[in-house]
Amino acid sequence: QLQLVESGGGLVQAGGSLRLYCTASGRDFSNYAMGWFRQAPGKEREFVAVISRGGGNTDFADSVKGRFTISRDNAKATVYLQMNSLKPEDTAVYYCAADLRRTYYLPRNLYDYDYWGQGTQVTVSS
């Protein structure tokens, strides 16, 4: 069992930056690959970014590549999503997720993840 809590969402102007946080408790955080997903009203939940257990490998959706950065601090049981050059289309509820499995690939599918946070709202104005 792992509990995840997101924070850091808010209102920002297009072109601005925002840093999201996901703190974990309950199990060994370093055993999980960690992902970020987002869901806009009326749309499917979509993959944003993922980071490996040790933090050495990352992957991003094409829509955010070059603008977003994912990182983690296993000692603090925290994963971060640094969002730069924000666009109105980035507006969504952002979710943190954890994958217990040990695989050679970085998961991009919602169904690969075992635990989810409650989400944090990000709104980007034009």
Image (tube, grey):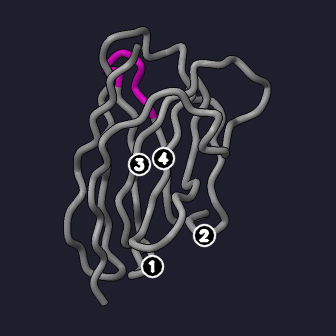
Give the foreground label among 1 and 3.
1
Q: Position of residue 46 (x, y in %)?
A: 56, 58
Residue type marked 3: Leu
Reading the image, the residue beneath label 2 is 63
Disc 3 + disc 4, Cβ < 8 Å: yes
Residue type marked 1: Glu
Reading the image, the residue beneath label 4 is 36
Reading the image, the residue beneath label 3 is 81
Q: CA distance from mark 2 to mark 3?
A: 14 Å
Residue type marked 4: Trp
Lateral position of residue 30 relative to residue 63, left or right: left
Disc 2 + disc 1, Cβ < 8 Å: yes
Q: Secondary structure at mark 4?
A: strand
Q: CA distance from mark 4 to mark 2?
A: 13 Å
Q: Secondary structure at mark 1?
A: helix
Name the foreground residue: 1 vs 94: 1
Q: Classify mark 3: residues with Cα within 10 Å, few (<14), some (14-19) or many (20+).
A: many
Ranked by sequence position, the earlier of labels 3 and 4 is 4
In the image, the segment drawn in magenta is 72-77
Indicate the quadrant where residue 77 lies. Answer: top left
Q: CA distance from mark 3 to mark 4?
A: 8 Å
Q: Which disc number belongs to residue 89?
A: 1
